Image (spheres, grey):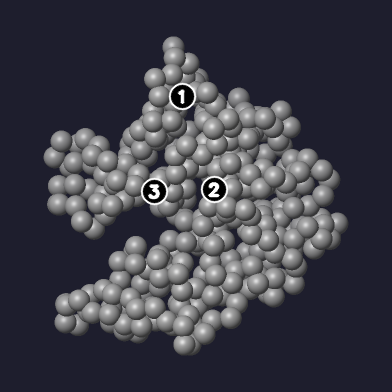
Amino acid sequence: MDIGIDLGTSNIIITTDKKGIIINEPTVIAYNKRTERVVAVGTEAYRMEGRAPEHIAVVHPLQDGVISDDILTQALIREFISAAAGPAIIKPRVVVCVPSLITEVEKRAILDAASGTGSRRVQLIRKPLAALLGAGMHINRPEGHMVVDIGGGTTDVAVVSMNGIVAARSVKIAGDRMDRSVIRYVQNKYQLLLGKKSAEELKMELCDLYDPADDVCRTVKGRNLSRGLPDQCDLSQTELLEAIEDDITAITDTIRRVLEETPPELVGDIYHNGVLFTGGGACLGGLEKYFRRTLGVPCHIAKDPLTCVARGTARAFRYKGVLQDGFERPESYEIPVES
């Protein structure tokens, strides 16, 4: 069995080329600090966040696209691979999706975590290539395709041509950073402390990047910082945009820098083909129109942007012999597993 893993900061998505997406759950693990045993992973662990007793730790083992806890990440991947592969006689081959500008240290941490699950072979593919494969693009042609993947921990921007990455940048500004910006804004303006879940839901339901309105509001509930009691306030679309404006501007600047580093011929292709947006951040209201106005080029949101990268990861084994990045020199990424 060949298994593709999109190991995101917010969600882990596991796919196979034949069955498609078989697991899509939050990248969260809960363990008992007294017994040091795993209590729950994924959705079940996510439901415990903020509600578990003191001896149950609910942990996000990835922060800003980087593994912050090797042991818990390995335990999380092991649980999901076991659920995906079942009682398989032959150990699966695994390909893991990673940010475009991952360091060697970060790469080794991911390989160690995935290989510790008993996989037969572990390989990596870069997110921009996986995103374009998942969107059904023909990346083997000598023409430029630009992809912007706004995930939970990182935003990856890249231009791809002839199976390789021509220019790329990766910034640790994405969905989680925007959630923190919303929490900080409401805290400073209304003296109201929101939870992470509440901030994320507010961002996805209320956001309009293109044409925010003052009269479109949502009621948010939290704890009043001065009184310590439950309280609520109304937040408008304009206020929400003000909260995350710096983050959106940083992503826009990153896209512009990548375009500046791209050869003119490929920039012409991008003007024709447009910019493809994937990841959870692509679901923000008005995003397509906002970037079309800001960049002056056509912009498109991938079909089912949340799972686009995962679908491409599953298809990666078909292109193992031709991809110039991600699968280049695969023998240097493989970790042999003793029989």
Q: Which residue is mark 1?
A: 119
Q: Which residue is mark 3?
A: 26
Q: Image check: 31 left or right of 250? A: left
Query: Which kind of residue does numbered mark 3 sit on?
Result: Pro
Q: Badge 3 local density, few (<14 within 10 Å), some, or many (20+)?
A: many
Residue reaching furthest bottom?
Answer: 215
Q: Image check: 197 left or right of 132? A: left
How far from the left and from the top, in percent, is residue 133?
A: 67, 43
How far from the left and from the top, in percent, is residue 2?
A: 54, 27
Question: Considering the numbered disc 1 on the image, is that residue within a helix, a strand or a loop?
Answer: loop
Task: Check contact, mark 1 vs mark 2: CB within 8 A.
Answer: no
Report the residue at 84% width, 45% height from top. Answer: 142
Which of the two discs, 2 and 3, labels the residue nearer the N terminus?
3
Which of the two discs, 1 and 2, labels the residue nearer the N terminus?
1
Q: Which residue is mark 2?
A: 307
Query: Which kind of residue does numbered mark 2 sit on?
Result: Thr
- Identify whether 47 is placed above or below 1: below
Q: Can residue 266 be spotted in the picture?
A: yes
